[in-house]
Amino acid sequence: IRAVSSAKPKVADYPFTTLVPNLGVVSVEAHRSFVMADIPGLIEGASDGAGLGIRFLKHLTRNRILLHLIDMAPYDDIEPADAALTIIRELERFSPTLAQRERWLVLNKSDLLDADTFAERRSAVLAALDWHGPVYSVAAINAEGTSALCGDLMRYLEECRAREAADPQLAAAEQELQS
């Protein structure tokens, strides 16, 4: 969120730095923007209340799309694919409906790995998740790859709004889902 908005959440060189949700306005063009929420990372058992658990999972229900940010060069020894699977399991345990929400993968820290290592880890993550959706590689520290991601997000959100404006039942269903 720091790389794409003016939000200034705490950042440190250890996992789970984010302790509270942060909001930031992402400006794509002069009159095109959206609000992005940075939700703290989930640990195994979050859906049962472990860590900061359920308090933050509830925030996710109000988002139209989930960006699944995966640390490709983690400080601990946890494989990126294993970390991603933990998040998905917690989403599914908390709310099967939420787990079905549109989700894109954002593979972060592409700048810290050589191309071969990054490609191997990327392949491992995609295979472990049996992923077929959008995938973005970014280096948030220098905003590399974030313009394409934000532009695509803006288009996606505008398309959602247009579909809901044309279909009141779809708009009502989205409101129900968010509540």
Image (tube, grey):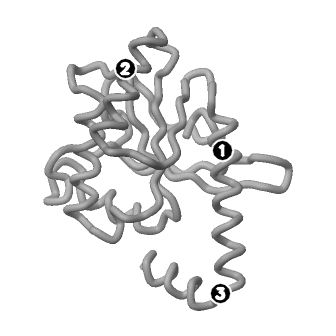
Work out whether mark 1 precedes mark 2 in sequence or the reverse, and give the earlier one. Answer: 2
Q: Residues within 10 Å of mark 2 (few under 14, many from 20)?
A: few
Q: Residue furthest top?
A: 114
Residue 38 visible in the current orientation: no
Q: Is the C-beta separation of discs 1 and 3 under 8 Å?
A: no
In this rendering, would 6 be left or right of 169? right
Q: Amino acid type of disc 2?
A: Glu
The picture quadrant where one finds residue 68 is: top left
Name the secondary structure under disc 1. helix
Q: Which residue is mark 1?
A: 150
Who's the residue at 33% across and 57% down the image?
56
Who's the residue at 31% across and 35% down the image?
16
Q: Which residue is mark 2?
A: 120
Residue 55 visible in the current orientation: yes
Above-or-below relation of 77 to 82: above
Q: Amino acid type of disc 3?
A: Asp
In this rendering, would 20 be left or right of 166? left
Could you say where residue 76 lies in the image, as x and y percent from the top left? 23, 21
Who's the residue at 49% across and 63% down the image?
63
In this rendering, would 134 be left or right of 179? right
Name the secondary structure under disc 2. helix
Work out whether mark 2 precedes mark 3 in sequence or the reverse, and give the earlier one. Answer: 2
Gap in angstroms between the C-alphas marked 1 and 3:
26 Å
Which quadrant, please, contains the N terminus?
top right
Could you say where residue 52 lies in the image, as x and y percent from the top left? 24, 51
Find residue 167 and name its label: 3
